[in-house]
Image (tube, helix red, strand yellow):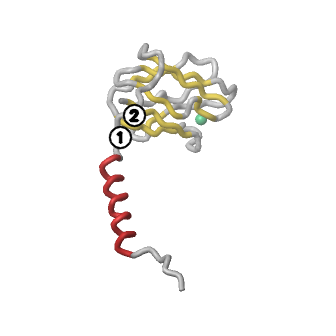
Amino acid sequence: MRRLRQPLPLLSLFAALVLTVGACGGGSSNKKASSSSGAGSQTITIQNFKFNPDKLKVKVGDKVTVTNLDAGAPHSLRADDRSFNTGIFNKGDRPRTITLSKAGTFPYDCEVHTFMKGTITVS
Ligand SMILES: [Cu+2]
């Protein structure tokens, strides 16, 4: 006869502990700040129907310059909530600049090709 079964109460106590620790320890909203140059200006390049980088972290007030390198393909960079929008522009057009004036996480897409997506996180 084996008696290796765990007593059930101990297990549930352990589970409760894990849950509690998880609740308290989580929510580390203060992740490492963007390790950019801190000059308040960054760039996103559009090429091959992709935003590069497609995930960008900036500070409130920073500007992001967007360049389209796809010949013959007009693109835009448009926040889902429309808080920024480059409008549609082409390769060879002057780069567009957007200003990130409020904190938050902003998903965006291209108005012409809505499968093109990215996120700018402003803190
Ligand atoms: Cu596009």
Whether label 2 touches label 1, CB < 8 Å: yes
Furthest residue toward top: 39
Depth check, front residue: 91 or 24: 24
Residue 31 circle label: 2
Q: Position of residue 72 (x, y in %)?
A: 69, 28
Q: Is residue 113 left or right of residue 102?
A: right
Residue at horizontal 67 percent and vertical 27 percent from the top:
70
Depth check, front residue: 49 or 18: 18
Q: Residues within 10 Å of mark 1 (few under 14, many from 20)?
A: few
Say whether mark 1 is within 8 Å of ligand 1.
Answer: no
Residue 28 circle label: 1
Q: Secondary structure at mark 1?
A: loop
Q: Position of residue 69 (x, y in %)?
A: 65, 23
Quarter of the image where the N terminus is located: bottom right
Q: Secondary structure at mark 2?
A: loop
Depth check, front residue: 109 or 43: 43
Residue at horizontal 58 percent and vertical 32 percent from the top:
51
Say whether mark 2 is within 8 Å of ligand 1.
Answer: no
Residue at horizontal 32 percent and vertical 30 percent from the top:
102
